[in-house]
Image (tube, helix red, strand yellow):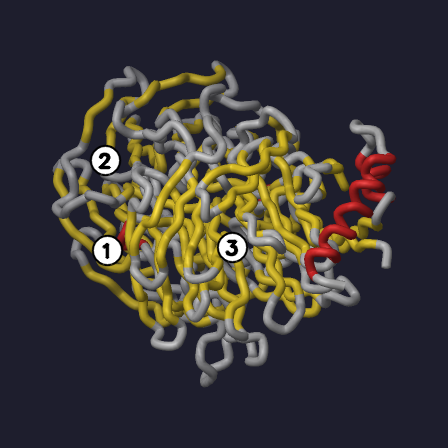
Amino acid sequence: MTLMRRIFAAGVAAAAVLALAAPAAPASAAGAARGAIEELGVPLRDVLLIGGTVAPGPSGATVLWGASSGAPAHLNAVDPVTGAEAARYDLPGAGGSWAVEAAPDGSVYVGTYGGSRLFRWTDQGGVKDLGNPIPSETFIWSLAAGEGATVYGGTSPGGRLFGYDPATGVRDYGRLSSSHAYIRSVSYTNGKIYAGTEAPAKVFEVDAVSGMVRELPAPPEDTTGKWAYDVNAAAGYLYVRLGGASPGPLHVWDIAAGAWVDKLDAAHGLDVSPPDEEGRVYLVKAGELIRYDPRTKTITPTGLPITGRVANTRGIGWARLGLPDYPGMSVVGLLWRGLMFRYNPQTGARSFVQTGVKGEPIDVTALSEGPDGRMYAGGFLNGGFAGINATTGKVEEFHTFSQSEDMTTHDGKLYVGAYPEARVYSYDPKLPWNSTEYSPSPEPGPAPNPARLVDFAADKQIRPRAIVSAGRYLAVGTMPDLGHLGGVLAIWDPETSTLKHSQRNVIKDQSIVSLAYRDGILYGGTSIYSGQSATPPTQPEAKLFAWSVRDNRLLWEMTPAPGKPAIPALTFDAIGRLWGIAGGEVFAVNTAARRVTQRVRLSESASASGQLAFNNKDFQLYGAHAGKEVFTLNPLTGRHAVLKEGPVHQLAVHRSGDVYFAEGSTLFRYQQTR
């Protein structure tokens, strides 16, 4: 039977089956007509701690408090002596937290993302949900304890500062800067609140009583592109770290003198410790815990290494351990994967202890078949990397890794796009895993695997949202960072390990969020949005474009789905038509004629989310529609049916014909009746 006849026969059979179902058939009925859906479980699970502090916990004993990201997030209390979990509390409706702070009255506050909620823990009452202190805001970035039970917080996307007192409720200090959307960092001392913003970094001093706002002079360096990422007040000094998640300069402000007095390079964040009796603080600098004296401007190394890509503290403070090598008070802190570090200033004793903080399920953000026939999954924020046996559906391999934006197979390797900095890695499944950036204890000797190939941070890019095999090359499409528009189209040559071409703003002020390749031509789908939602778009609708890989030039562009903000997925069918999804619309394009030849309307949605893939086994299209359902569509007849309702954003087709998709952290597999 010829290919065209096979396609036609499959189309007729599918149309006949679908015609038997009512147009509004339940998802279960639609799926049962042709195959079965199997729940495969949670492939990605790990610890991600961001916000943390050291303070009294249950029954008054000192603990390390840390918020672990999950659904829901949890507030964890860790015993600094044993590393055991002393307590664990649900944070309903929250995805995680950058902001954990202990108030002088003994209560602990948590400000969250995924709901912008404020929680308060007390030893007597446990955790209480205080709601969203500023209803217009979606993210609480930082909290600082004031007097008594008072706490202050910074938010986005409105860049607001607020205060909360259990006796009087919420006080909205308003927006500190009309040109900033984030209050990223907050600290408090002696009646003053200090707040830092996103780029270009500014630091404000706010009188907690009167609300009067004063902008501090800029640190003595160019703040373009740099955030006031961390702000900590300690013993009369203000420590302001510029940059982002990676190490950056830490500037020291003498509050009494009203002047910048020192600068430490390669400071990691996210906090400096509370001061010791002599006003000295501890922090991570250049991969090592150090002590810093602001009066003498001297640095004392401790010999305690904190290495890897993510080597910043997630809560640092003081605890009395009562262990033989740890007399008096010791510096203790948490790292992002739940590891605790300890250092004693008297003896120099230092140690690491894996804590009992439990791993949380991680939402799947990327799915792809690998060169070895396994399915691979990457996750959101806490990341993770899992290899799944395509026969059994079981996870065979898991590793700590970055947040993944996209994955694809090319010439025997799996290529992964990672957030932030729009990094691209290559992974060879035939070789041992060895991530020097993310593995807790990578074995010395072997070359990095995944190997970091390139990033697009210099072009202000943050998400490599689209990656596709393009002949001998690998093509990458990206989304820019906060305050920027216009993605990069890059062509990587794996044979020479060089960029053949890289160009920003191929389509003005639009990100590149989907790619497909055929016969020397790249086809790209765009989004009017930046890689950070607080950046307003300037363009009205998404575009489809064609790009010559050989000539490095734009061939044409068109608007296949008028009014839709994004074209998040593209795929070719067996007869060479290019299909895309945009909101609630699926469309086919004749690329030679440069015109839309077919439209299928699923809904009126204008969502920027969607997936679409062609299945070479049954010649059907499979997709995820607006984050609410999985569907199948016959490209010859346009007939479509819902396979499963649910919040699906990721989907991929395996060479076997099985369709994998994820609802949050849970992976499913659709198998046709064979």
Q: Quadrant of the N terminus?
A: bottom right
**Residue 223 in the figure: left or right of residue 562:** left
Check the picture and name the quadrant holding the C terminus.
Answer: bottom right
Q: Residue at x 79, y 41 (%)?
A: 15
Horizontal and vertical percent position of residue 61: 58, 47
* N-term-proximal mark, 1 vs 3: 1
Q: Residue at x 29, y 18 (%)?
A: 211
Write the residue at 29% across / 30% down. 180
- Please tell me in which quadrant of the rendered image residue 531 appears: top left
**Does residue 232 appear in this view?**
no
Circle 2 crowding by C-alpha within 10 Å: few under 14, some 14–19, many from 20: many
Which amino acid does the dot numbered 2 rest on?
Lys
Give the SS element for disc 1. Answer: strand
Farthest residue in the bottom direction? 445
Q: Amino acid at mark 1?
A: Asp
Residue 456 place in picture, x, y as percent: 33, 56
Residue, x 43% and y 34% (percent of image)? 559
Discs 1, 3 touching: Cβ within 8 Å: no
| Mark number, residue 406 | 3
The answer for how far apart the CA atoms under marks 1 and 3 are is 45 Å
* Mark 2: secondary structure: loop
Q: Label 2 vs label 3: CA separation?
A: 34 Å
Q: Are marks 2 and 1 in contact (CB under 8 Å)?
A: no
| Residue at the spot of label 1 | 293
Q: Quadrant of residue 583?
A: top right
Q: Are marks 2 and 3 in contact (CB under 8 Å)?
A: no
Nearer the observer, 170 or 150: 170
Identify the secondary structure beneath mark 3.
strand
Give the image location of residue 206, x and y in percent. 27, 25
Q: Is residue 17 visible?
A: yes
Give me the C-alpha separation between circle 2 and circle 1.
25 Å
